[in-house]
Image (cartoon, grey):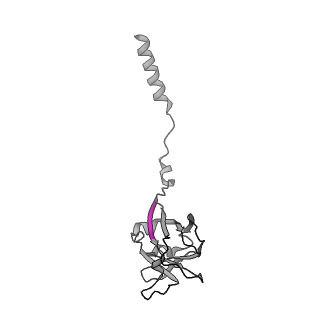
Amino acid sequence: MVIKKLSAMLFCFFVITSCVNNLDFSQIEEYSISPEYTVSLTYFTISPPQFFNQAGLQLPEISDITDFRGLENSYARDKLLKLDFNVEIKNEFDRDLTIQISFLDDNMNVTHRFNDLKVNANNLNYTFDETIEVSTNPNIKTTTKIKVLILDNSAVPLDASAKTEFEFKSSIKIYVNV
């Protein structure tokens, strides 16, 4: 019994005396947190009949404008560091398509425009990623809309009865500094 008490006392002594360094609370001033938020932006599918107007004429382009209000919050806008924009496309059409993506403000002014995406025919796994640094493009903070324009430059008419599909998905990862 005495050995147990002595062992317990020795253990407590070593635990108490093992932490003898002073704590440096000034380290907290150098600490920085950069949370990440991933947001889905745009999703749509297009079938061949959507490339035709009421008169049956094929349109050379289709556009979609989506509202994005993720940066309207002044806290997020002031602390924004960068954005990672991601796109996944499934093109079942038998033709190459060109995709133009622009970020717009409330007045439809371009805050950022990506290079045109060339999606080959029958490409079922096209991906695109781009990082936008706020320090080099501060206008990105005023973005409230995303415009996607799909251009069909093929000379061959599209078959309106085809059962193919074009699928577009995009998301954005927002990095803020706290």
Q: Residue at x 48, y 87 (%)?
A: 57
Q: In the figure, 134 relative to 6: above or below? A: below
Residue 104 can be seen, yes or no: no
Name the image quarter holding the N terminus. Answer: top left
Can residue 20 be seen in the rendering of this structure? yes
Vertical comparison of 117 with 61: above or below: above
Residue in the picture at 55% in, 82% down: 157
Q: Which residue is rendered at x = 59% and y = 71% of the image?
A: 121
Residue 116 horizontal side relative to residue 23, left or right: right
x%, y% of residue 109? 48, 83
Lateral position of residue 52 relative to residue 95, left or right: left
Q: Viewer-proximal residue, 118 or 59?
A: 59
User: Is the stretch drawn in magenta largely helix, strand or loop?
Assistant: strand
**Which image quarter is the C terminus in?**
bottom left
Q: Quick one: which residue is furthest to the top in this view?
A: 1
Stretch in magenta = 37-44
Work out which residue is located at the far bottom of the displayed protein and give it: 55
Q: Position of residue 31 (x, y in %)?
A: 50, 53
Q: Is residue 9 above or below residue 162?
A: above
* 29 over 81 or under it: above or below: above
| Rendering coords of residue 163 (x, y %) | 48, 71
